[in-house]
Image (spheres, helix red, strand yellow):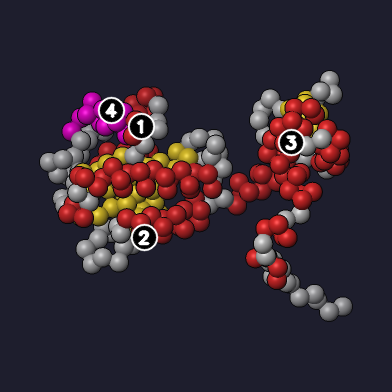
Amino acid sequence: MQELKRRRGRPKAFNAPESSSVIQSLDRALDVLEALASPEGLTLSELAVHLGQSAATMHRVLSTLERREFVEISPDRQVWHIGPEAYRLGSAFLRRTNVVERSRPIMRELMLETGETSNLGIEKDGHVLFISQVETHESIRAFFPPGTLSPLHASGIGKALLSTYDDSRLTSLFKKSTLERFTENTVRSIAQLEEELRVTRDRGYAFDDEERTKGMRCVAAPILNVHGEAVAGISVSGPTHRMPDRQVPQIGERVRDAAKKVSRRLGAP
């Protein structure tokens, strides 16, 4: 038998107006799944009111989803919840999630918005390991090729990651190490570092003010996974004259927003 040719995923009418391309019954079923995502679940009447649908319509949708185990009802037959099949499919998404893959489009946007190099890094044995970069088109630029290591305390991404750690983890990281100095701006003590981390948590982004390399600045924010854990940091880096004090808060907001976008792509709440 001749092998069937695999067709592209999008039909010709994929870009048709939304009203003509949406399958209403499927759309309604997805609304139900989203509504039931809360841990408390919903009764049939609560679900009908929440979605502005009749109880009869909601019951048909729930019955269909229940047969496929996408939803389930509590033993007392009162409250509906997300079912095991929805979890199984969600887990398939998590298995294919890759922080580099998910970050690249956002990093590119961040570079275009700020005009500066965007970096992605993870924590590795007390250092930041840079794993991806989108370079600016400027001739003078920050350059951290994948594989570069930088101390956590003297890096924007490092301080962004540290700001999410609890006290015991911070103690474990620094109890046997000294804070190596690279410039006169490098953090000098654990007390100073703790204060910087407090400020970082409050404003949502970290700031490396020529602490690793003279003449270079970096603004970074943590990327969270589905469990709310920091798995990476995203940043923009550039020369001090292109990142003056007055622009740092604006850049910080953009980096913070970029980190949130990537976090959502990883399933963060």
Check disc 2: other Cα within 10 Å, few if <14, some if 14-19, many if 20+. Answer: some
Per the rendered image, the range of residues in magenta is: 188-200
Question: Dot 4 corresponds to which residue?
Answer: 194
Residue located at (32% from left, 52% from top): 236
Q: Earlier in the sequence, mark 2 or mark 3?
A: 3
Instruction: Give x and y (percent) for residue 152.
Output: 30, 40
Residue located at (71% from left, 57% from top): 19
Q: Earlier in the sequence, mark 2 or mark 1?
A: 2
Q: Earlier in the sequence, mark 1 or mark 4?
A: 4
Label 3 is placed on what type of residue? Gly
Image quarter of residue 84 = top right
How far apart marks 2 and 1 lie (CA) works out to 26 Å
Is 199 magenta? The answer is yes
Callout in the foreground (2, 1)? 2
Is 125 magenta? The answer is no
Question: Dot 2 corresponds to which residue?
Answer: 112
Instruction: Give x and y (percent) for residue 223.
Output: 44, 43
Callouts 2 and 3 close, C-beta under 8 Å: no
Callout in the foreground (3, 4)? 3
> If the image is split into quadrants, where does the C terminus sit?
top right
User: What kind of element bears circle 3?
Assistant: loop
Label 4 is placed on what type of residue? Glu
**Residue 89 - label:** none
Label 2 is placed on what type of residue? Leu
Label 1 is placed on what type of residue? Arg
Q: Earlier in the sequence, mark 3 or mark 4?
A: 3
